[in-house]
Amino acid sequence: MCSLLELSYNLFRYSLFLWIILSWVQIPQEHPIGQIKSILDQFYNRILAPIRSVIPTVRIGMAGLDLSPIILILGVGFIYPMVFNFLCS
């Protein structure tokens, strides 16, 4: 049970970082990496929508900085040790 929880957490965390990096690059959807990006877009946009509704995009000149992935990383990083200790101790 604990190893499955740890595996899920690592998969979630690494796929989030992959999604963040892929969001900076234009990739055609027909490309295999573009298909992976599309799947990650659907998954993470659903998770980040409630965070984005509370925390607006920070404007820096003409560019915008979306802080919702950072909030998600911090939130999951804060909650995971508590859940892990509760379930695996």
Image (tube, rainbow, N blue to C red):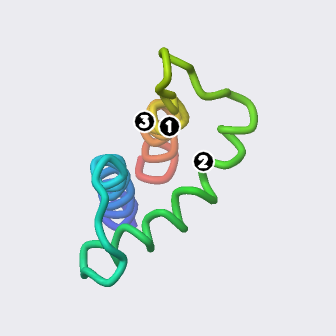
Q: CA distance from mark 2 to mark 1?
A: 22 Å
Q: CA distance from mark 3 to mark 1?
A: 10 Å
Q: Is residue 9 left or right of residue 64?
A: left
In the image, what residue type sits under mark 3? Gly
- The residue pinned by badge 2 equals 48
What percent of the width, then of the height, locates residue 31?
25, 80
Q: Is residue 2 left or right of residue 58?
A: left
What residue do we see at 51% from left, 45% from top? 83
Q: CA distance from mark 3 to mark 2?
A: 15 Å
Q: Nearer the viewer, residue 7 or 58?
A: 58
Between disc 3 and disc 1, the foreground one is 3
In the image, what residue type sits under mark 1? Met
In the image, residue 55 sits, relative to residue 12, either above or below, namely: above
In the image, what residue type sits under mark 2? Leu
- The residue pinned by badge 3 equals 77
Quadrant of image for the N terminus: bottom left
- The residue pinned by badge 1 equals 82
Between disc 2 and disc 1, the foreground one is 2
What percent of the width, then of the height, locates residue 76?
48, 40
Mark 1 element type:
helix
What residue do we see at 29% from left, 66% from top? 27
Q: Nearer the viewer, residue 25 or 4?
A: 25
